[in-house]
Image (cartoon, grey):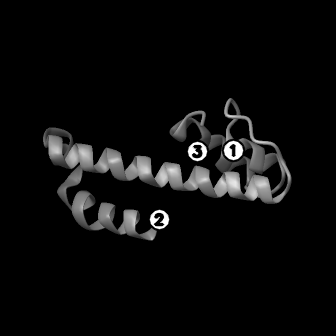
Amino acid sequence: MEDYLKELEEQIIPHGPERVLKDPTLLHTAERLVQLLADTMIDINVHILISRDKSYDKTQSTFLMLAELGVLPEEFAQKISPVVGLE
């Protein structure tokens, strides 16, 4: 995750939102990095759920499941769940 965040910080953010939105290469790079970050977060969530012997249903948000277990703050889980969609 650190590598993906570093790439965003160094290669995308300095250009600013207007340029990123106008430049297909920058936009697609940003989208891909965000997708990789989301996938990594979901993988970590699933690992935690499995380690706690919780079944994982692809129709449920792993963030909300972790909030129910007290692993994540409820407010954070509510905010991030729509961002990554249902896994």
Alpha-carbon neighbours of circle 3 within 10 Å: few (<14), some, or many (≥20)? some
Quadrant of the image for the C terminus? top right
Q: CA distance from mark 2 to mark 1?
A: 18 Å
Element under disc 3: helix
Q: Amino acid at mark 3?
A: Ile
Alpha-carbon neighbours of circle 2 within 10 Å: few (<14), some, or many (≥20)? few
Disc nearer the start of the sequence (3/2): 2
Rendering coords of residue 4 (x, y %) = 38, 63
Element under disc 2: loop
**Residue at figure coordinates x 50%, y 49% from the top left:** 38
Foreground tag (3 vs 1): 1
Disc nearer the start of the sequence (3/1): 1
- Pick the residue in front: 74 or 57: 57
Tell me the residue that label 1 is attached to: 62
Rendering coords of residue 66 (x, y %) = 76, 50
Q: Using the image, determine if residue 6 lies above or below residue 22.
A: below
Disc number for residue 1: 2
Q: CA distance from mark 3 to mark 2?
A: 16 Å
Tell me the residue that label 3 is attached to: 80
Instruction: Kindly indicate whether the residue at mark 1 contacts the one at mark 2 (C-beta within 8 angstroms).
Output: no
Q: CA distance from mark 3 to mark 1?
A: 10 Å
Element under disc 1: helix
Q: Amino acid at mark 2?
A: Met
- Pick the residue in front: 82 or 1: 1
Rendering coords of residue 71 (x, y %) = 77, 58
Rendering coords of residue 28 (x, y %) = 25, 43
Instruction: Kindly indicate whether the residue at mark 1 contacts the one at mark 3 (C-beta within 8 angstroms).
Output: no
**Residue at figure coordinates x 77%, y 53% from the top left:** 49
Q: Amino acid at mark 1?
A: Thr
